[in-house]
Image (cartoon, grey):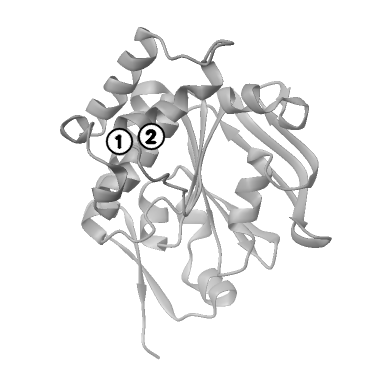
């Protein structure tokens, strides 16, 4: 079953086209990584899917057109975590994660016991329960990224859109975060679409990869199909070697000429 379908999606800012004619199907419960060199249009495409930038073409979540949804209904089916999220001053971790329940609150906008229980569960799953009452500003980079993921999970959306979720994290924290995303995806059947800079991580976690270059789709397929040394050299202007690790996963390593 297809959870997300993009057909001929073109998007940009202030009259400037950034991504052109993107067509891709994302099966339910799968993980699609959007990769490409700087300025390729990765974040713009993710924002177009989230309905945050002007776009033409069709974006369907299940059978629903994102363009036809109101903000609250859109937030019930799409959970979006930007690359540099706004973390309001004065909020605790619990307060911040509760913001994810906003699309589900009633007319009075008051959270129920079930909302609080759901947030507590999200904090526990992301190993944040001990930090529930800590101010956001006191968290480390890895803890903040987990708090952002907890807020998105609290939305209970079927599709998660994660823009560079490992930004600013060292390799250990990046791996830990992506392992959490993968575990949650498998446990809940959630569909994940993320942009990723690190090509080795893009080779090892997603099911499929979409390569953008200059706003156009340069390749799409499994990581093994897309992440070849010739293709990466051509589109990134880099000398790389693609290795196979002992466990069968791919490693993209820079190579000196």
Residue located farthest toward the bottom when viewing the structure as drawn: 257
Residue depicted at 56% across the width and 22% down the height? 76
Identify whether 162 is placed above or below 231: above
Q: What residue occupies the far left of the structure in this picture?
A: 130
- 240 relative to 9 in the view: left or right: left
Which residue matches tag 1? 93
Element marked by disc 1: helix
Quadrant of the image containing the C terminus: bottom left
Query: In this view of the protein, which residue sits in the foreground, 193 or 75?
Result: 75
Q: How many labels does the image show?
A: 2
Q: Specify whether 30 is left or right of 8.
A: left
Image coords of residue 134 (percent x, y): 22, 38
Side of 168 where 29 appears, left or right: right
Give the residue at x 41% y 46%: 87
Image spot of residue 153 (x, y percent): 41, 29
Quadrant assignment, res 27: top right
| Disc 2 + disc 1, Cβ < 8 Å | yes
Judge left or right: residue 1 versus residue 18.
left
Where the N terminus falls, by quadrant? top right
Dot 2 falls on a residue whose secondary structure is: helix
- Number of residues whose C-alpha sits closer than 10 Å to that of mark 1, classed few (under 14), some (14–19) or many (20 or more): many
Mark number displayed over residue 96? 2
Residue 242 in the image: x percent, y percent? 38, 68
CA gap, disc 2 and disc 1? 5 Å
Q: Which residue is drawn at 58% across and 35% down?
A: 26
Which residue is at the front of the view, 35 or 170? 170
Check residue 9 in the rendering and tell me which mark sits there, or answer none.
none
Q: Above or below — where is 150 with respect to 163?
A: above
* Residue 248 can be seen, yes or no: no
Eyeballing the image, is 21 above or below 192? below
- From the top left corner, tell me how far across and down residue 207 is, in percent: 45, 42
Q: Which residue is at a point 45% across and 29% down the rendered structure image? A: 99
């Amino acid at each position: 079953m297809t959870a997300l379908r993009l057909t001929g999606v073109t998007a940009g800012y202030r009259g400037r086209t950034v991504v052109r004619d993107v067509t891709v199907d994302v099966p339910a419960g799968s993980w699609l990584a959007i990769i490409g060199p700087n300025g390729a249009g990765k974040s713009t495409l993710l924002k177009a899917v989230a309905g945050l930038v002007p776009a033409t073409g069709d974006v369907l979540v299940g059978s629903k057109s994102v363009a036809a949804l109101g903000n609250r209904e859109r937030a019930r089916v799409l959970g979006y975590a930007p690359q540099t999220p706004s973390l309001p001053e004065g909020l605790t971790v619990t307060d911040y994660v509760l913001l994810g329940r906003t699309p589900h609150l009633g007319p009075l906008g008051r959270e129920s016991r079930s909302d609080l229980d759901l947030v507590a569960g999200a904090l526990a799953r992301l190993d944040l329960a001990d930090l529930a009452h800590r101010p956001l500003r006191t968290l480390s980079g890895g803890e903040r990224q987990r708090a952002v993921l907890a807020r998105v999970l609290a939305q209970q959306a079927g599709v998660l859109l994660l823009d560079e979720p490992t930004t600013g994290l060292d390799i250990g924290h990046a791996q830990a975060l992506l392992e959490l995303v993968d575990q949650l995806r498998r446990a809940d059947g959630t569909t994940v679409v993320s942009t990723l800079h690190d090509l080795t991580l893009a080779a090892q976690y997603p099911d499929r990869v979409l390569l953008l270059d200059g706003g156009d789709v340069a390749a799409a397929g499994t990581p093994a199909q897309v992440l070849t040394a010739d293709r990466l050299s051509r589109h990134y202007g880099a000398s790389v070697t693609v290795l196979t690790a002992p466990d069968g996963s791919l490693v993209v390593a820079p190579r000196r000429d």
